[in-house]
Image (cartoon, rainbow, N blue to C red):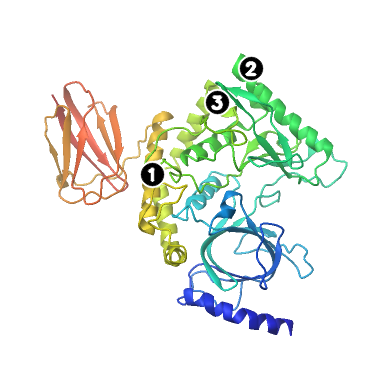
Amino acid sequence: MKFFLFFLFLFPLLLSGQELLDEGSNLPLFVVDTYGNEIPNEPKTEAHLSIIYTEGEISFLTNSPNVYDGQIGIEVRGNGTANLDKVSYLFETQLEDGENNNVSLLNFPKENDWVLYGPYIDKSLLRNVLTYELARDMGYYASRVQPCELVINGDYLGVYIFMEKIKRDNDRIDLTKFDDPDILPSEGGFLFKIDSWWNPNIGWQSATYTVGNQERKWNYHYLYPKADEITEAQKSYLKNFVDNFENKLLSLQETGDAAVYDLIDVENFADYFLINELAKNPDAYRLSTYLHKDAESEDGRLKLGPVWDYNFGFSNYWDYKNVYSGWEYDNNWWDFPDQIPFWWSVLLNDPYFENILKERWAFWRSSMINCANFTDQITSWESLITPAAERNFARWPVLGQPHILDWYVGDTYAGEVDYLNNWICQRIVWMDQQLDYLDTNIPPVADAQLYTIYPNPATDHLTIQSTDTFPSYLHTIRIYDLYKKLQWEETLVPQFNEERINISLPDLSTGIFILELSNLKNSSRWKIVIK
């Protein structure tokens, strides 16, 4: 009888949802019924979840659930994003008695804590997806991701990203457990984070440090062990370790004592910095900044990560439109409790860390951090998501509409994605310049006859005229001398239907040079004369 009543209640809701999904979806369908209850910010409310998905096929709401069909507890998640029209959710798979139900969903490792992230400010729908994929490709744990479509109580809510909640777990943040209540604090693992909101029951505040003329401090949150489970001995050990790390950083700044490098995984710190700076993430280092430290008998050094929350990154924040330059680590306009720790100001001024940073950038640039790789990934994700994105933006008509916290406004989903792609390519070029990396990966040579170069000889300017229009993605213009030494470089994105590129030449000596124009697919080269 209970099942029959549940079905009668759910049936009209399914019909309502199916009107928006009548052609089905190539993404997993998450269907939630809360039995008429509102979903609070906390605590979780009881609900039923059905997941319908067969890879490579179209799924319909009328299909039988084939991934999960059972009880969950669900709540709204997030701080500022909880006030948006489209909110995100945290849910826990449960047994009928409310206990944890560890299951594998969509080939993710078994667990019970999950996230349904609702991209709203990020109209590409991809900023978190790309960042987490990058971190995993670099060998770090980051939440696994799967785009899906969500229906709650018959209301179609658009595209969501199904993700893993960050927690200590063998298949997530693999840290030594405090199984034995008598285990020494030094022989267990800790997961914690820096974030703005805080109270004395959930963590501690840093000391106050002076950076330039500004005093800074920040908040730490306990995550594992949880704030209501961590012992006083564990609290004391963790705080003393972090205090020691920060004091040794001060010694590095004041005396050059490099002992701090014994306390941190320096390559991990460099990689975390590069990911955040590649994204030009305005929340970097100060919000949702996760840290972890394993037992001394394992690898007791301090490490950063996993990466989290990049919806404002990649030029999606205030006046960052088309701003490819500038570091985020030294932003000093934040007031407490949103301030950036002083760590990076010290590390970036130390030659040892600077060299490590350049080496790591060169290593990743020679493999996965390149424009072509990001373009391939974005194209693949866009192809997968576009049909669902059309439904998403029918439900949430924000395309072409400015939001208080975003700057670039694309009229179409493809326009939002193209902007993201072009911006990443230009950001890579800027970071190359800052980190002394010369990209020698030149695309195949195109037919130079497709272009006319004039005037040649040139003095202070020249024009590249195409027989067709230039594609509206990143182009790089380089000038080499006859010894193949790079003399000048500039990047640009041609306007739509543009047939010529005008170049203001740098101050070069008189002579013969090689002009190169390259983009994602090919390059062309010509001899030019500077007089």
Mark 2 touches mark 1? (CB < 8 Å): no
Tell me the CA gap for discs 2 and 1.
Answer: 39 Å
Tell me residue 225's x, y (percent): 76, 45
Tell me residue 72's x, y (percent): 69, 66
| Residue 13 sits in quarter | bottom right
**Residue at 67% over, 34% down:** 302
Residue marked by disc 3: 345
Task: Count neighbours of disc 2 (C-alpha within 10 A) and say few if under 14, some if 14 to 19, many if 20 or more.
Answer: few
Who comes first in sequence, dot 3 or dot 2? 2
**Residue at 50% over, 25% down:** 355
Tell me residue 443's x, y (percent): 30, 44
26 is higher (above) or lower (below) than 196? below
Mark 1 touches mark 3? (CB < 8 Å): no
Residue marked by disc 2: 257
Left or right: 300 in relation to 310: right
What quarter of the picture does the N terminus occupy? bottom right
From the viewer's side, name the closer residue of 171 and 201. Answer: 201
Kindly identify the amino acid type of the residue bearing the numbered disc 3: Ser
Kindly identify the amino acid type of the residue bearing the numbered disc 2: Asp
Residue marked by disc 1: 423
Outermost residue toward the top?
255
Mark 3 touches mark 2? (CB < 8 Å): no
Which type of secondary structure does the marked residue at label 3 adopt?
Answer: helix
